[in-house]
Image: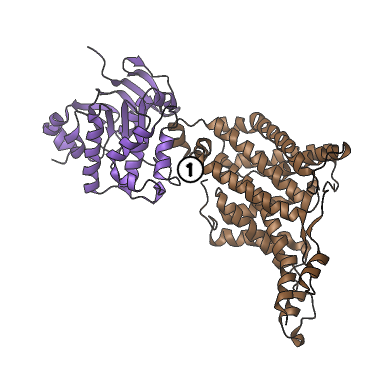
Chain colours: A purple, B brown
Amino acid sequence: MSDPFLIGDCMTGGYGKGPDILHECTIAVEKGEIAVIVGPNGAGKSTAMKAVFGMLDVRQGAVRLQGQDITKLSPQDRVLKGMGFVPQTHNIFTSMTVEENLEMGAFIRTDDFRPTMEQVYDLFPILRDKRNQPAGELSGGQRQQVAVGRALMTKPSVLMLDEPTAGVSPIVMDELFDRIIEVARTGISILMVEQNARQALEIADKGYVLVQGRNAFTGTGQDLLADAEVRKSFLGG
Amino acid sequence: MDFLNALVVLANFVVIPGIAYGSQLALGALGVTLVYGVLRFSNFAHGDTMAFGTMVVVLVTWWMQSVGISFGPLPTALLALPVGIAATAVLMIGTDRMVYRFYRQKKAEPVVYLIVSLGVMFIMAGLVRFIIGPNDQSFSDGERFIIKVRDFKQMTGLDEGLAIKTTQGITVVTAIVVVAVLFWFLNNTRTGKSMRAFSDNEDLALLSGINPERVVLYTWLIVAALATIAGTLYGLDKSFKPFVYFQLLLPIFAAAIVGGLGNPLGAIAGGFVIAFSEVTVTYAWKKVITYVVPDAWAPEGLVQLLSTEYKFAVSFVILVIVLLIKPTGLFKGKAL
């Protein structure tokens, strides 16, 4: 069996010297697909994603990107390897303009990043209109677009989103999901943590239901939506 | 009643000195605010950093004077300025490598940094006094005035005279140039933007691949330049005495906090707020009022709200008022 594009394989670990939060948790995403991590509050969803991104100690198990073991790399080094990460909060430079946010996203690039910026503006046309406005003055949904756009500026091969729709209205949420599908179609793998489990699983190629830091259910988005037990315990019937 | 003469007196004793002093405070406060914005602590060593930079400039100026190098009508100190900046930059980066980096790696609390900067302050103060001594030093040369009182009276035919010292002119011009260059740098260069990004959101800056050590390095270089320039301008305008530079810490911090710590625009505004408050409150208004009101109303006293010895109280009072009413300062603080 060949490895998926990115896999956090049987990860066990926690923050600093603290107790283990994840227990043999496995999260993977294939090229150009969308994988979604859902689960109840405190299930370790965000922690699982941060583990994949190297923001906590993975004491057992491994993280592999394109078959290469990256378990020991720092988050910054993983960015260089082509991983983009959008934190849940504080994910934009509020005092800087939209365009400067995108420029900072491209900080590690030495080539011409104008084409990528144009692609981001094509994906999020509202950002083109507001390019010279401080990002902190934008609405919640627009901020998330800036945050995703910033992460896309590194031309990542996998984009990790921590609750991208937290605190935005349902209409904006649908719109954001549409954009995320568009990003995935360009060949970028998406790994996403979501509170809105039902909507997220609808667009997911692969879904992971975590409970207390363990894989509870794993399957395609549709399978999980159809699964009676998953519906009963996590999707409200 | 004679408004024109009143205006001239006001300009001569309040406006011009206020602008010059305000520029010096603004440059000092910019240094403090940059350290706060990027390194996230209040650098109490800033006053003595200014003293160190100025001391080097003074020493180099003396050497230049002794070998006969001069800058024509301008003070020789301006020629010595680059040497002073370079020396201060070496000192700043050395201090960072030997002291601050240790605490950065330990992710120390801001209050720990603050105490550490106090220690650095004592070391620097000792260093300066060891090398040049605690006394007043004069190093100003060149033309003393741009406009002399007598010339002004002859030109305008007014009773009151107006003098603009060369050092005041140089202070204002230099401050404008330095501020313009600094803002251009912060807003238009990759390094400047990365400094703002780091100040705005450190974690995201790291995720974007911005190297924190580089940002810190550039910050200290800029702070060294700002401190040396501010100190030299102040020294040319008044005189160089290490203890006075330590005392400048209060109005400088007041300026930075009034404007909003971490906000460069605020630091400049704060500098002028503090400077003009100090000058207007400690100025004896008798002459101005006498010109403006009818003769019978002319005041008998000096109409001086506070004697000049108490000028530091002004900074203190403004600081307390701002912290009580608007703790984030006039401009919103905490990001470059």
In the displayed structure, does residue A219 sit left or right of residue B25? left
Q: Residue B130, relative to residue B270: is it above or below?
A: above
Residue type, numbered disc 1: Asp
In the displayed structure, does residue A104 sit left or right of residue B141? left
Residue at left 52%, top 51%?
A: B333
Identify the residue at the far front of this view. Answer: B155
Q: Can residue B45 be seen in the rendering of this structure?
A: no
Q: Residue B213, relative to residue A132: is it above or below?
A: above
Residue at left 24%, top 46%?
A: A172
Residue at left 76%, top 79%?
A: B290
> In which chain is the residue bearing label 1?
B
Q: Is residue A151 or residue B80 the one in the foreground?
A: B80
Q: Quadrant of residue B17?
A: bottom right
In the displayed structure, does residue A100 sit left or right of residue B262? left
Q: Position of residue B200 (x, y in %)?
A: 48, 43
In the displayed structure, does residue B79 sit left or right of residue A88? right
**On-image quarter of the N terminus of chain B:** bottom right
**Residue on which the image places disc 1:** B200
Q: Residue A29, relative to residue B152: is it above or below?
A: above
Q: Residues within 10 Å of mark 1 (few under 14, many from 20)?
A: many
Identify the residue at the far top of this view. Answer: A1
Q: Is residue B86 or residue A63 the one in the foreground?
A: B86
Q: Quadrant of residue B289?
A: bottom right
Does dot 1 land on a helix, a strand or a loop? helix
Q: Position of residue B263 (x, y in %)?
A: 55, 49
